[in-house]
Image: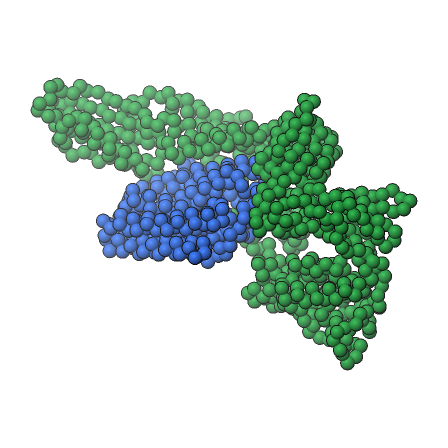
Amino acid sequence: MTRTAQQFLKSPKAIVGELAALALLCTLGAAIPQQGTATGAELEQLHQAGPVLAWLVNALGLDHVFRNPLFLSVAALTSASLFVVILGQLKRLRFQWSARLTEAHFRSAPFRAEFEVELPQNRESAPSAHTRIWTERRIGLLGSPVFHIGLLLLIMAGALQALFSTSAIVDLVEGETLPPEAKAWGAQFSGMLGKPFHLDGPITLQTVKAARYTDGDLRDLKIEVAHALAGKTEIAEIAVNHDLKIGGSRLFLGSDFGPAALLEWQRAGAVSNREAVLLKERGAGNFEGAANGSGGEVTHVRVLVGANGERPGGVEIRVMKNGALLFTGDLAAGQAVNLPGGETLILHSTPFWARLRGIRDSALWLAYASFALLMTGVVLIFTVVKVDCCVAVTPLGDKCRIFVALKPHRLAPLFQERFDLLVRQQQEAAGGTLAAPGVPAARKTPPPRWFSSAASQTAAALLLVLSSGALSGCGKSASETEQARKLVERYNQVVSEAYRRGDVRLTDSVVGPKEGKKLTGLIGVRLDEGMTLDSQLVSLEVTGVEKAGEEMRVRTKERWHYCDRKIGSGALVGEESTDSYEMLYLFKKMDKKWLVDEIQFTSKPIVGRTKLPFPTERPSASADATVSTQKQESKP
Amino acid sequence: MSPFALETIWHWTAVAFYIVGMAGFAWALFFDKPERIRLVTAITALGLVPHTTALVLRYFHVGHGPYMMKYEVLSSNAWIAIAMLVLFVWRKPNWGALALIALPAAILMMGLGLSTNPEARNLPPTLRSIWLIYHILFAKLSVGAFLMSAAAAVALLRKLGGASGRWVDRLPGPEVVEAYIFRFIGFGFVFWTMTIAAGAIWANQSWGRYWGWDPIESWSLVTWLAYAILLHARLFFKPTARAVAWGTLACFVVSVLTVLIFPFLFPSMHSAYFQ
């Protein structure tokens, strides 16, 4: 490294510039959704936020700031600066630590006083001339080098992790054994030069134990695994926040777990199809999942796990095919059900599953060592300040002249009390009374104020960083119309599926209690008649949005195609229909979520079919009117 | 009486003490009664008793420390800030002016907390770690220290702006105030570094990685870098006292946004725990 490069790297402007660049890039990375931490929907929204922003995101890699070349270059430059600064600090430390101080060192001391003391008459002998120089809290000198070394090591640990670490995740069912091959893991996340993750021996998930609070929230989760170690099988426990070390790898347990339904589909003359359906928690012990059968069937499974965390004895099952509900009911472990079409569905058992994460990071010890150095260094910097002290006594007959000086390494104005105490101690030690007024402590000359404009620029840059972050945050919210469209689309999607499956509980996430009660009745009526509604949204146009506080009214024009199907066979009941509606949705914010409170038609619906497939309780004047009324209530 | 009703009574009793304390500081400073500073500091300190009682009752009610809801977080942040203020002003009564800036901020923080949803939330398994307690404790201590630095910066700006009045005159000279600003920032920076390190160790214990560029992790790094810039700029460029004060306030705004605002705006692992 040339001398010029070294000079540049340790120059104050370069160092502050690097820190400012890092702060700016981190602000962008924190404020803009990033690949790896943001959801797919957030990233899609970012790319669709307008042509200019989309271009900027693509051109500057703003959706992966922490991996783009600019960030990596700034981080590399900062590391180089750190290295050069540390070299300089270590040289200076060696010099400062062993320096022999003289009175000349105190010429620039911020605290100095010189005064004469009259010696007491009964004193046996006059004090001899002497100068005492000492240093207090010398260890404070170590603070900055230790801190910066810790910082450099932390960056190195991060770089090594990015290059060589490897991790993988896998979902295991109780009783399942994971072979020691990398391909046995579900997903791999290796560093640029890392090898795929694998364990040295097989591991078997034996049991999953979940403890819950009385209201059903998860309190604790642990699993027992059997793993082969040096030819012997050992049983070990992994819990949330308690990993298991096997060889150079570590296994972690997150909070992803649940019951699994081990299902088998049998068809005469065909190979049976087995699948473990992993059910995921939808809230307070309610677990759901789905599996695709070989003949196009979709099997939806639901289980409620109680607060005691016991294994469920059975599951709630709905089998769908091409929009038709073929079967709905409860199955106990070991039970089978014959489906229309000749297939048999068997529920073998309902064990628990859990997600394991395996990690190998050989630089972890370096990261921990750097944390220790960083914390030691920062504590030394700000709490232990080296102070040089000097006391010189010169006898002058029946008086003596005392010179006291104090030179702190940092934060000099805070040492006034310490200096006053030192002066008092010297007066008392001399044993006399003050003969001449003390010379006021010479203050350090104020430093040149040439930086005033640069400081203002720094403050302005900070404010800029801040405001850019805030603006990016504001930019995240979509327009009201777009938000309204998404809410209506989501509502229609969920309610259509609830009608199709005959499962009103699916609508809990989109409707309030009022609309939910109505839907319970409407879906229930169809189930009682042995049919479900299969609907498809053909087109949707948002024609108006009014938002006031916690309420939002959304007007739409919608076109729907739908039909009723017989449960079991999926056969059509009555006519298919294509309808057009003009609707008003009243959304209310409940528990921080926009939920549909009420739906109304704003004009008479244009209904395709003329006759309902099931009788209505409400007498009406004409068939058209009956259909309209029923549609209004049952419109998905 | 329900535990929540008891907590509320103790909380509002504490607020009453703090308001009386603040009025007392204003009276002592504006009407030149320096000998009364210790008395009003003691009144303010008395407020910490009901405040502590409310937090302890909350602990027994919900079964975990004050780090799950805005209600708990803001109240405990205010407790730490007021405790720091009381300790400092008791030792250095000349700095009573800080109370006129820090106390209203802390009372505001408490008021905001008390007006939010006080529902008790269960602690999820990932939060059941000793490192979380260190992480939260250090974060609260750094917020308290940063608040004190910002209060000193406001006092410095008033002093430099030629504001007259005994409450300003009683403060030490600008050089000393500036040095104290850096002492507060230094303490805050130490605790903030520890907050990040404890959070990293906890993340490694829970998820097997000590840094994941989660938005709030990144904001905490931005805050750390902002203060690092200020500290380096002071060391290298010796800026004016006015520039130091404005820089301190800018950094304080960044830290408040990181700790109290951004967890609500940016979807992050942290936002789920701070509803």
Tell me: B104 left or right of A111: right
* Closer-to-camera residue (A66/A238): A238
- Residue that appears at 77% across and 51% down: A299
Can residue B274 be seen in this snapshot? Answer: no
* Closer-to-camera residue (A456/B127): B127
Tell me: B41 left or right of B227: left
| Screen quadrant of the C terminus of chain A | bottom right
Position of residue A326 measured from the top left corner of the image (x, y, whole percent): 81, 56
* Closer-to-camera residue (A10/A357): A357
* Closer-to-camera residue (A82/A366): A366
Residue sticking out furthest to the right: A269
Q: Is residue A102 above or below residue B74?
A: above
- Residue that appears at 51% across and 48% down: B68
- Shown in blue, the chain is B
- Residue that appears at 20% across and 24% down: A393
- Residue that appears at 29% across and 53% down: B25
Residue sticking out furthest to the left: A121
Q: Number of numbered discs present? A: 0
Shade representing chain A: green
Can residue A229 be seen in this snapshot? Answer: yes
Position of residue B140 measured from the top left corner of the image (x, y, whole percent): 44, 44
Tell me: A105 left or right of A623: left
Position of residue A504 measured from the top left corner of the image (x, y, whole percent): 70, 60
Q: Is residue A98 above or below residue B88?
A: above
| Screen quadrant of the N terminus of chain A | top right
What colouring does the structure picture have? Answer: by chain
Position of residue A288 measured from the top left corner of the image (x, y, whole percent): 70, 50
Quarter of the image for residue A138 reads top left
Tell me: A431 left or right of A243: left
